[in-house]
Image (spheres, helix red, strand yellow):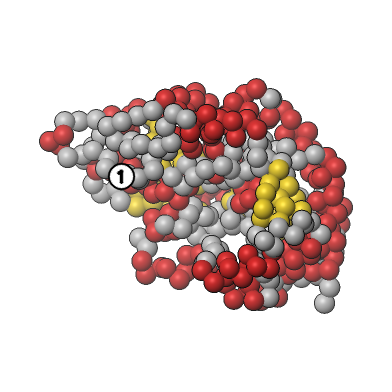
Amino acid sequence: MNNFDLAQRDLAVLWHPCTQMKDHEQYPVIPIKKGQGVWLEDYDGNRYLDAISSWWVNLFGHANPIINAAIKDQLDHIEHLIFAGFTHEAGIKLAEQLVAITPSGLNRCFYADNGSSAVEVALKMSFHYWRNIGQIQKTKFITLENSYHGETLGALAVGNVALYKATYAPLLMEVITVPGPDCYYRETGESWATYSERRFELMEQALQRHAGSVCAVIIEPLVQCAGNMRMYDAVYVKRLREACDKYHVHLIADEIAVGFGRTGSLFACEQAAISPDFMCLSKGLTGGYLPLSAVLTTDEIYQAFYQDYSTLNAFLHSHSYTGNALACRAALATIEIFQQNDILVKNQVLAKTMAAVAMRFHEHPQVAEVRQTGMILAIELVKNKQTREPYPWQQRRGLKVYQYALANGVLLRPLGNVIYFMPPYVITETELEWLAEVAWQGIKRAVED
């Protein structure tokens, strides 16, 4: 087998996600034969550094021996079973671990099978909670501009990236969208904290006006990943927690992309020293191995559903693969790696190295901003550095960076004209230096007229 033959077979039958399939007439799909650590290898022997953790999921490298061994062991016991009326040790242990490591008060764990589904669970659970306690007027959700929470209809409704949402607008519930704290727009010399604090006043006004009809506010703490890796200060999350308490509104923290060490702490909410009412987890939860998500919530919310069958107020949301045993075991192994290897401490060193290798991008004439939160670093390309005028989207400058990087052994997948590094935590300093060099050369070619 070779790349060409497999690519042809692929295009005869497959429809890939987040892809204009006609592009593949010019840019072939790349069949991968195997992965090891941060590296992927195709059928022609070409290797690619996985600089985006295979869509932000892979934390400890491909073919990680600890996670591999855990899954192999689980296969000899039970691979999957119905999670209604039955349970298994891996699912119980994982819930115990998640309750232990997430912010205090999140004592109940509900499994789903992907991030978007976790958001659906949190939205429905919040709405249903208010209904169960008699506050049936609470039917709305507040979200931030430039937010992204998934592709299923409920999750899409509470997102705000037009590229994903606009086409399906007639299908979506109405939400209240508040201008966000994206620090890209701060004044010259203004700190992230000051800008985020100032922007919070708009959220406060929305809560004052709409709290009586609002179930919850949903946010991605610290980094709006799909929204061009835009970032803000933890003070916004802290103020939001206080306001949600004041106005009797739930806070949903979508930590699907930012959880499990991505922002520098195990969970982004820790940097604001708060506990949300719901925390949605997925992506890195299984180390990038298997689809699994979890919604953590409070005993108070759980108790609103804990009644006799005749009340008909049970939470009936379900997935066939809820609590899949193999996925739970992979997640347990992932958490074990965190706990036994001081990963967060090691990531502090890696994050400093990422900042150092990206230093020269700050002075690039077509880079408006280099921003970083923990193990996420973003480089924003613009047509005019002084005015921050963006390149027209039709020019697809980011795609040129992607193509150059692939030709030189790096998997980068820019968000429009934002180039970002979000590598597995097992990347080395030398690999980071090389990644930055390839990105530099790719940008150099992409901005040439």
Residue 156 x, y percent position in the rendering: 44, 58
Residue 37 x, y percent position in the rendering: 71, 41
Q: How many marks?
A: 1
Q: Residue 210, relative to residue 234: is it above or below?
A: below
Q: Which residue is mark 1?
A: 317
Where the N terminus falls, by quadrant? Answer: bottom right
Q: Is residue 156 left or right of residue 201?
A: left
Q: Is residue 379 left or right of residue 258?
A: right
Q: Residue at x 66, y 55 (%)?
A: 32
Query: In the rendered structure, which amino acid carries the disc numbered 1?
Result: His
Q: Residue at x 53, y 55 (%)?
A: 147
Q: Is residue 250 left or right of residue 132?
A: right
Outermost residue toward the left? 310
Camera sees residue 415:
yes
Q: Residue 35, relative to residue 295: is it above or below?
A: below
Q: Residue 196, relative to residue 92: is it above or below?
A: below
Outermost residue toward the front? 1
Q: Residues within 10 Å of mark 1 (few under 14, many from 20)?
A: few
Q: Residue 138, relative to residue 287: is it above or below?
A: below
Q: Residue at x 51, y 69 (%)?
A: 13
Residue 80 x, y percent position in the rendering: 40, 37
Q: Is residue 332 left or right of residue 230?
A: left
Camera sees residue 111:
no
**243 and 333: which one is in front?**
333
Where the C terminus falls, by quadrant? Answer: bottom right
Q: Residue at x 43, y 36 (%)?
A: 79
Residue 319 x, y percent position in the rendering: 35, 45
**406 and 33: which one is in front?**
33
Q: Secondary structure at mark 1?
A: loop
